[in-house]
Amino acid sequence: MIKRCPQHGLFRGEHCHCGSAGQVLLDETKTEQLGRLVAGSLRHFPADLGLEMDSHGWVDLAKLGEVVASRHRWAGKDLIIALIQSDSKQRYEISGDRVRARYGHSVDVDLDHPENKSPLLYYGASEEEADRILEIGIKPASQRYVHLSGTAEKAWHVATFRTGNPKVIQVDAAAAQNAGVRMMRVSDDIVISETIPSIYLSLLASRNIFRQDKP
């Protein structure tokens, strides 16, 4: 659900952090419908919808608004902006009259986000995946880039959606980048990367997963 607080602007959920119930812009169902269409448009099948995407993933915001409105009469450019500005996961960004997904592409794009500065990063996997990854490295599967987490705890949490026995692989990002592996910071929690050779990977002991960033 997307709402607008008269004091703090757009937010998701029932109440703003100030306690205001706010004004409803989109209910849960319409927020999900719009989110799915925007994700497909900017990550997976822009050409199928008549959108021209440049090499860095940008499309015309007004044109995307027209595409959305042609499928949902209640939607358009203004609600796309509201969807993006209220998204705590920072999945999309707007620059002038253009919009793009920050990560998650299956189409071929060459993203140009800032270089990662974190020396260590983390990747969550099942036990079976972890064994294979430690042998062959981390490679993009259905997406253009590998998605890494900034903390072991976050990587573990992501992996719980795929397995009941998550494992966390620690990535020596500093060494990998020094060797030429391109890694980019796309949000507060996510770094995307090209293929990471196994030499830069190690399995993090379970007892250490929730000890990151603690004295």
Image: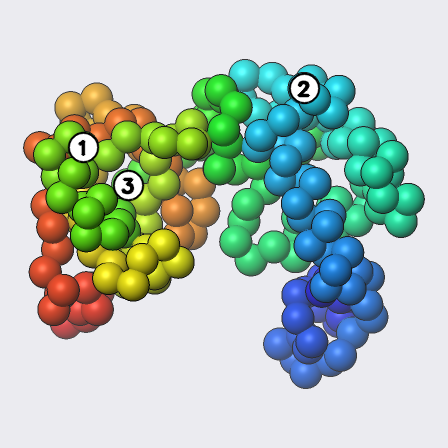
The residue sitting at 56% across, 58% down in the picture is 88
Callout 3 secondary element:
loop
Q: CA distance from mark 2 to mark 3?
A: 34 Å
What sort of colour scheme is used for the picture?
rainbow
- The amino acid pointed to by label 1 is Gly
Find disc 2 in the rendering and name its residue: 47
Residue 42, image x and y in percent? 62, 32
Q: Are marks 1 and 2 in contact (CB under 8 Å)?
A: no
Which residue is most to the bottom? 19
Earlier sequence position, callout 2 versus callout 3: 2
Find disc 1 in the rendering and name its residue: 137
The residue sitting at 32% across, 38% down in the picture is 116
Find disc 3 in the rendering and name its residue: 117
Earlier sequence position, callout 1 versus callout 2: 2
- The amino acid pointed to by label 3 is Lys
Q: Nearer the viewer, mark 2 or mark 3?
A: 2
Residue 164, image x and y in percent? 29, 63
Q: Quadrant of residue 179?
A: top left
* 156 vs 107: above or below: below
Q: Is residue 172 left or right of residue 93?
A: left
Q: Is residue 11 left or right of residue 134?
A: right
- The amino acid pointed to by label 2 is Ala
Q: Is residue 21 visible?
A: yes
The residue sitting at 79% across, 60% down in the picture is 26
Quadrant for the N terminus, please. bottom right
Q: CA distance from mark 1 to mark 2?
A: 32 Å
Quadrant for the C terminus, please. bottom left
